[in-house]
Each structure stands twice: as C-alpha cells, then as structure tokens.
Image (cartoon, helix red, strand yellow):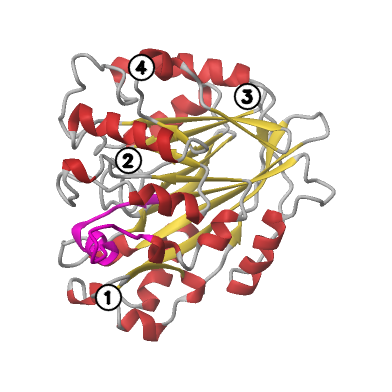
C-alpha cells in the first residue's frame, strides 16, 4: 500500500535544552495518494489562513545526482543544458513550500571545467536555473563531491550563484573564513530558521591550502567547531536544522556513526536532522526530542551500476515538515511526513524525469530503462521498498 504518512509524534516531551524549539504532539493523519498531495499543495501555499504568520512548511529533496546519462538527456543542440524535464512533475509541489531545500550532490563548476558524471562530477550553470525554476530556496553543497573540480570548482560555483541567482541561500561551501563562520538564517512567516550543512569528507581530496574553509567538514577534528555553530544557531534562530552528508552508500539502514552524530546534533540544539549521501532511503526516527530523516536517497539518478540493489537507487523521498508556534510561542514541529519519488529514465532528450510514486504505475515502471540494469525494478518493488524502510 502506498501512503503519504503524517507520522504520529508519540510520547514527545517539550525540549528544554534549546531556544524553545521542540516537537509538538499535534498531528493530522492523511492517506498517501495524489489527491491528498494536491490538497497539501494548496495548504502549503496558503498565505491567508489563520496560522499563516505562525506556521511554516519545509520541503527537502535528496541528491541531485547528475550522472552522464542525466546530462545527456538535458543537453541541447546548441550545447546548452536544460534540466527542466527532471522537475516537470514535482515543481508545483516544491514551489508551494514556504522553504524548499535540496542537496546539490555535484559541484556546479560550469562548462569551462568540463561537464562530467561519475566519478569526478561537474555540472553546468544551467542546473542552477532548473533548481530555481523548480522552486528551491536553499541549496546544500557540502558533499563528498564538492572538491571534484578543486578550488576553481568551488569559486566558479559560488560566483555563478551570486551573479545569476543571488536570491538563493547557498550553504556548505564558502569563499572566506568569515563566510564559514556565519550562521545561515532563513525567515518565513515570522519564524527564523538556522540551516547547517556538513559533509563527512571530500573523497580524499584535500582542502586547498589557501582555502581551508572551502567545505564544511563533519569529522572529529571539526567537532568543537560544529558544536559552536549549533550553539550560535540556537541563539540566533527559533528553529535549528542540520543537514549532514553522512552514512554508507546503498545501505538501507543508518550506521552506528550516523546515530552517534545524530545524538551529538540533538544534544547540542538541533531540532531537525535531514541526511543525504547513501543514495538510498533510510529510516525516519526520533533521536531524543529531535526528528531525524537519516537519508532521503536520490531525487534524480541514472547510475551506470548493474545488478541487484540498483533499483533501490531510483527511489527517493521528499521530507515535509510543518513548523508552528506552541502556546508558549516556541517553534515546534506540528507534523511531518515523507513523499516517495522515483526517477524514470528513457533514452533521448528530456528522457529523465522524476515522478511522485503516487503518480507512477506498473506500465510506466516496465518502460523504465533501469530495468536493463536491474530486472527487479518495477512499480511494486518501489512501493515495497518504501514500506520496508519507512514503515518497519
């Protein structure tokens, strides 16, 4: 059974260790189907309802993983790239959120550095336009591929964002130490959010000698700095979100290390944790009083891998969280849910797009080219995967 789950928040006590942020016990059950999602789009976009000034809907998408076939599907005869087809079925939903966050898995170093897929990724600037048009407000760049084009990739990426889309909040990579020390803040409907983004590493590529601040790292050497960030974020914001790039690729369960880091974030003031990197979905659970999505999986992907398990990489999820103020005026989570998505791939221009699983079907799944790489992939496989990871 496919469901959009508004997950009950059971036995949650209000937090006392941070700036009033917490998980509320208020929830609303909803059946997972496209009709319900359409209703939610209307709710997300409503500015004039009674709670509009004290309620914020946050959506986050997983990895924008641009393998060579994804880039090929976006390339035009004039040499430019158009990734709008990727978001054609989801943009309305994403745009309706008060705050929409996405993990941009690969660095956007521009065509001058060579557009490429695995293992050393680099995306053209056209990706930025597609992300903006899809409705994203916050782009996360602290990933293990952040340094795939070295220092110049970081600089090109930051410069193009600033020049072409200054309205976007870019987090996780930095042009200066001062920039790294700043706590990214986003305000919506009277609630201020701090959003922190770190990666476990950069695939063994060292930070530039003259830019040790280029990427926000999450390791023992930087643990005290992260703690200071959390404390500062808690002081500046009503609600603290941490987006760690962590875990083990292709594993459907969180690791002990993820659990340890989640506890560290929670103990030091994080109200919400949303993870990326494993390229598959992982469970959602409470870590103390802090809500944690261990991994949203891929939002878009067309891996070159073959064999059992490849099908898992085609299924991702959007996290949806509603934050409101409780009777004491403190920012709390009112409800949370997940919206499964599946990447549909076919040969040719615009042959890569993402469907909500509720809008997908058996006929479409049997035409997905990924079946040539993993014959297990079909509609039921996607449904059962979500049930197994999120419902058990």
Q: Where is residue 150 in the image (x, y as percent from the top left)?
A: 18, 30
Q: Mark 1 points at which residue?
A: 346
Label 3 to label 4, Cα distance in Å? 23 Å
For the view shown, which residue lies furthest in the bottom direction? 363
Q: Which is in the foreground here, disc 1 or disc 4? A: 4
Label 1 to label 2, Cα distance in Å? 34 Å
Q: Give the range drawn in magenta.
A: 62-83
Is 67 magenta? The answer is yes
User: Who comes first in sequence, dot 3 or dot 1?
Assistant: 3
Q: Where is residue 362 in the image (x, y as percent from the top left)?
A: 39, 83
**Mark seen at residue 224:** none
Can residue 350 be seen here? The reply is yes
The reply to whether dot 1 and dot 4 touch (C-beta < 8 Å) is no
Instruction: Answer few, some or many: residues within 10 Å of disc 2's Cα (few below 14, many 20 plus, some between 14 and 19).
Output: few
User: Who comes first in sequence, dot 3 or dot 2?
Assistant: 3
Q: Mark 2 points at which residue?
A: 255
Image quarter of residue 212: top left
Label 3 to label 2, Cα distance in Å? 29 Å
**Mark seen at residue 176:** 4
């Amino acid at each position: 059974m496919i469901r959009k789950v508004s997950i009950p928040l059971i036995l949650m006590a209000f937090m006392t260790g941070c700036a009033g942020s917490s998980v509320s016990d208020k929830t609303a059950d909803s059946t997972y189907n496209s009709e319900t999602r359409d209703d939610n789009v209307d709710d997300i976009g409503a500015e004039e309802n009674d709670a509009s000034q004290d309620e914020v809907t946050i959506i986050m998408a997983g990895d924008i993983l641009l393998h060579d076939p994804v880039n090929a599907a976006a390339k035009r005869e004039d040499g430019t790239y158009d990734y709008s087809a990727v978001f054609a079925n989801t943009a309305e939903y994403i745009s309706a959120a008060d705050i929409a966050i996405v993990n941009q898995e690969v660095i956007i170093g521009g065509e001058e550095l060579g557009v490429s897929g695995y293992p050393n990724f680099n995306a053209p600037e056209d990706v930025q336009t597609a992300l903006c048009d899809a409705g994203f407000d916050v782009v996360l760049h602290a990933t293990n591929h952040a340094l795939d084009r070295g220092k110049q990739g970081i600089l090109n990426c930051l410069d193009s964002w600033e020049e072409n889309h200054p309205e976007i909040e870019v987090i996780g990579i930095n042009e200066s130490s001062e920039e790294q020390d700043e706590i990214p803040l986003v305000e919506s409907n009277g609630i201020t959010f701090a959003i922190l983004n770190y990666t476990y590493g950069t695939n063994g590529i060292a930070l530039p000698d003259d830019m040790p601040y280029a990427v926000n790292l999450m390791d023992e050497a930087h643990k005290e700095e992260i703690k200071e960030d959390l404390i500062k974020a808690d002081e500046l914001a009503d609600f603290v979100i941490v987006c760690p790039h962590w875990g083990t690729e292709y594993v459907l369960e969180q690791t002990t290390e993820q659990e340890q880091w989640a506890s560290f974030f929670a103990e030091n003031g994080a109200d919400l944790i949303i993870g990326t990197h494993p390229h598959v979905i992982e469970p959602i659970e409470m870590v103390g009083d802090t809500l944690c999505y261990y991994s949203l999986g891929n939002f878009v992907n067309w891996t070159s891998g073959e064999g059992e398990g490849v099908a898992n990489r085609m299924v991702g999820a959007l996290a949806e969280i509603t934050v409101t103020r409780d009777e004491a005026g403190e920012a709390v989570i009112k409800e949370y849910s997940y919206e499964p998505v599946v990447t549909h791939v076919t040969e040719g221009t615009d042959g890569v797009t993402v469907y909500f699983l509720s809008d997908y079907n058996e006929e479409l799944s049997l035409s997905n080219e990924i079946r040539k790489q993993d014959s297990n992939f079909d509609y039921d496989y996607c449904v059962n995967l979500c049930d197994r990871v999120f419902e058990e």
